[in-house]
Image (tube, rainbow, N blue to C red):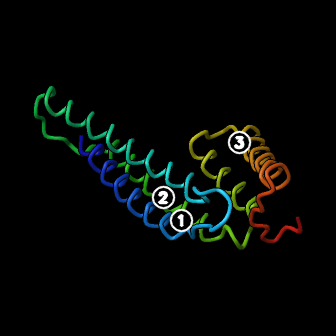
Amino acid sequence: MMADRVIFVCIIILAAVYFYATAQIPSLEIGDPLGPKAFPRLLGIALLITAGILFMEMWREAKTAPRQKERITAESRRHYMVIAAVVVWTGLYIAVFERLGYVIATTIYLLALMAYFHPGRWITNILTSVLFCAGSYVMFNYVLGVNLAKGILPF
């Protein structure tokens, strides 16, 4: 129950920051009237809908479930540590993204996460990380014409 509240508050804060960031996107005078703000705002709305659904589930559960004091167990403490580690790792990924480039930074990021969550499957983890990064780079760069961070690679 407490974890749901923490997630709910985090989603609301993330949605508020995200909506503020989308408000900073400049509007275009020509072309599509929705401009580049449409998709980011849809994602923000999806975040708020997700928070609303979680709130309704928490409310229903609070009405039907008997009141129990939640105990913090070693298992729940471990879950919080994993979440904190993923948040820190994501922050590091964002920090080095421009310097290393999309392909290298994302490959390392995915490989580290998959090595933790799927230990012992090195070949699968490496192949998935490399193929996902290469495939998404080709799709964005060559098919959609969206330039991703090059970093230290020449392409």
**As drawn, is 36 to the left or to the right of 102?**
left
Q: Nearer the viewer, residue 90 or 82?
A: 90
Bin the neighbour count of mark 1 within 10 Å (Cα to Cα): few under 14, some 14-19, many 20 and up.
few
Q: Is residue 76 above or below residue 56?
A: below
Near mark 2 (Cα within 10 A), the count class, few <14, some 14-19 or many ≥20, is few
Relative to 91, residue 49 above or below: above
Q: Earlier in the sequence, mark 1 or mark 3?
A: 1
Question: Mark 2 to mark 3: distance in Å?
Answer: 20 Å
- Discs 2, 1 touching: Cβ within 8 Å: yes
Position of residue 5 measured from the top left corner of the image (x, y, whole percent): 26, 47
User: Under tag 2, what secondary structure?
Assistant: helix
Residue farthest toward the top in the current orientation of the protein: 64
Identify which amino acid the numbered label 3 is placed on. Asn
Q: Quadrant of the N terminus?
A: top left
How far apart marks 2 and 1 lie (CA) works out to: 6 Å
Q: Position of residue 60 (x, y in %)?
A: 20, 30
- Element assignment for label 1: helix
* Percent coordinates x, y for residue 111 in the rendering: 68, 50
For the residues labelled 1 and 3, the Cα–Cα distance comes to: 21 Å
Q: Amino acid at mark 1?
A: Gly
| Quarter that holds the C terminus | bottom right
Q: Nearer the viewer, residue 53 or 38?
A: 38
Q: Nearer the viewer, residue 153 or 111?
A: 153
Label 3 residue SS: helix
Q: Which residue is mark 3?
A: 125
Say what amino acid the circle numbered 2 marks.
Answer: Val
Give the residue pinned by disc 1.
91
Task: Spot the residue most to the right.
Answer: 154
Q: Give the residue at x 79% y 51%.
A: 144
Residue at image position (69%, 56%) is 106
Residue depicted at x 74% and y 69%: 100
Where is mark 2, residue-wise? 87
